[in-house]
Amino acid sequence: MYAQQVETGTKAIKSLAEMGPEERAFQEKIDAEIKIEAKNWMPDNYRKTLIRQISQHAHSEIVGMLPEGNWVTRAPTLKRKLQLMAKIQDEAGHGLYLYSAMETLGADRDEEIEKLHSGRAKYSSIFNYPTLNWADMGAVGWLVDGAAIVNQVPLQRTSYGPYSRAMIRVCKEESFHQRQGYEILLHMMRHGIQAQKDMVQDAINRLWWPSLMMFGPSDAESPNSAQSMAWKIKRHTNDELRQRFIDQTIPQLELLGCSVPDPDLKWNEERGHYDFGEIQWKEFYEVLKGNGPCNRERLETRRNAIQDGAWVREAAVAHANKKQKQQAAA
Amino acid sequence: MTKYDELTEFLLRLGDSALIHAQRLCEWTGRAPALEEEMGMMNVGLDLVGQARNWYEYAAERINDGTDADTLAFRRDERAFRNLLLVEQPNGDFAVTMTKQFFYDAWQFHLLTMLKDAGDERIAAIATKSLKEVTYHLRRSSQWVERLGDGTEESHQRMEKAIDTVWRFTFELVEKSDAELVLSESGNIPALSELPEQWLATVNNVFAKATLTVPDEPSAFYLSARTGMHSEHLGMLLAEMQFLQRAYPDASW
């Protein structure tokens, strides 16, 4: 997750025979599961695809702090406040090391952030939905981080070394967030009053479909998947991962005693998977285009943060330069 | 309007200040000037909520009427809060936020350094643990004050303005209190008589490096955290922070 519809810039996948010697050596390495490192030769489109995917992922971590910022000032107990603050801090950290992984590919953090702010780069569509009650902080942890993990577990084996290593660390922290989110909901369902149980069901009703959309378009509508999979940037198709997420989440949903807003959801004995209803793809593409409920607010907040902080960053640089001159003179 | 004995009031002063300052830091989420500062502010905030919880737990045991740390944080009105006026002030720009942070850190640092030798073992233990965290907080905020004061023309001006905005609330950091005198005479805490001088020395030292001017000594006026005479900002802050506990008093979170 956190990366949806990443352009690969290729129309057809080349066979080894069609490749020049450098590209063939590169592809053979990938096929042999040898990691590509920053200094290795790589096709331009591989580099660009990775920059797009990793920056999208990093942007998602940062924008993803905003829906939580909406509730961190209203967390109901000291324990819940500490948990949410720690989660937000982790996300800033994920953003930082993902940007670092991206910079190993020759991209510049400020330039990529500028692309985000001007609407040229994407971030996960899920963060364009509002958080409207406290249970959203549980549901975001459980469903959104849960979906992210399903996507990211295979990314730990992604072909680009620095990205793979960043993912290993991110996954550890996110499974912790997911358990914590689930525990928030479970506590409200088991020990809460009716109003709290209603909050939980309401949060799931609102976040269920957007969580499924996090896996991106269906395979039929996903022209970039094949190339990303040949490069082993991606390891599974969007639909495979979506199915995996649903299959593992529904038993947890049942344990909560809640339901999802999908009348077509039912276990299919023959397939060994849950069947589920049609995703509202029109809504998905509208949110991607910038027309979701919170797109404008999220981007405006991020733009303001960077603009309002410009004088701070300038001062830090100016001061560091002064110090350097003083040291040189001494 | 003091409700509890001197020691409990003192614990609330420490706990409330830490919590309210952290609450202001939470307001920065997603809005900091750089990613590193998102992490830095959350890091400091986490330490402070943890400290608040420790002070509250001790206070709650002393009050001993079924009160716990959460009821102290989320069920009291503004007149019962004992936090420093300084920390409830709005964040303003990064200069105001960092100036508040620095004044508060310097106060915490010297106070906790004294309290780690408190006769009251519980206070000594919490102070010892907190001091490790606050030593880092003070280093961070001192460096920022220096950078911003001695950075660019604009950052210098913003710092001068920020100091002007919050300096008047620092009288509470340098005032002597009869209640604390009672506590030191009874052996609960060490004498805090040198705290004002030490705080001012740190401010002088850092401001000199930052090319900033230390204003004249602030004087007490009407408002006082010790009696819950707060600025109007605290009420709104609590309305937000306490919303869920107030709206659903029977809920368990």
Image (tube, helix red, strand yellow):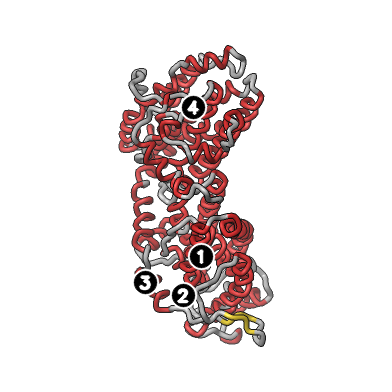
Q: Nearer the viewer, residue A138 or B32?
A: A138
Which secondary structure, mark 3? helix
- State the separation of the CA atoms marked 4 and 2: 51 Å
Q: Earlier in the sequence, mark 3 or mark 1?
A: 1
Q: Nearer the viewer, residue A300 or A257?
A: A257
Q: Nearer the viewer, mark 4 or mark 2?
A: 4
Question: Residue B160, relative to residue A141: is it above or below?
Answer: above
- State the separation of the CA atoms marked 2 and 3: 15 Å
**Rendered location of residue A269, percent (x, y):** 66, 85
Q: Quadrant of the N terminus of chain B?
A: top left
Disc 2 marks which amino acid? Glu
Disc 4 marks which amino acid? Ala
Disc number for residue A7: 2
Chain of the residue under the numbered disc 1 shown in the image = A
Question: Residue A281, relative to residue A323: is it above or below?
Answer: below
Disc number for residue B106: 4
Disc number for residue B96: none
Which quadrant of the figure has residue B66? top right
* Residue at far right of view: A32
Chain of the residue under the numbered disc 3 shown in the image = A
Which secondary structure, mark 1? helix
Q: Return the residue at label 1.
A: A201
- State the separation of the CA atoms marked 2 and 1: 36 Å
Chain of the residue under the numbered disc 4 shown in the image = B
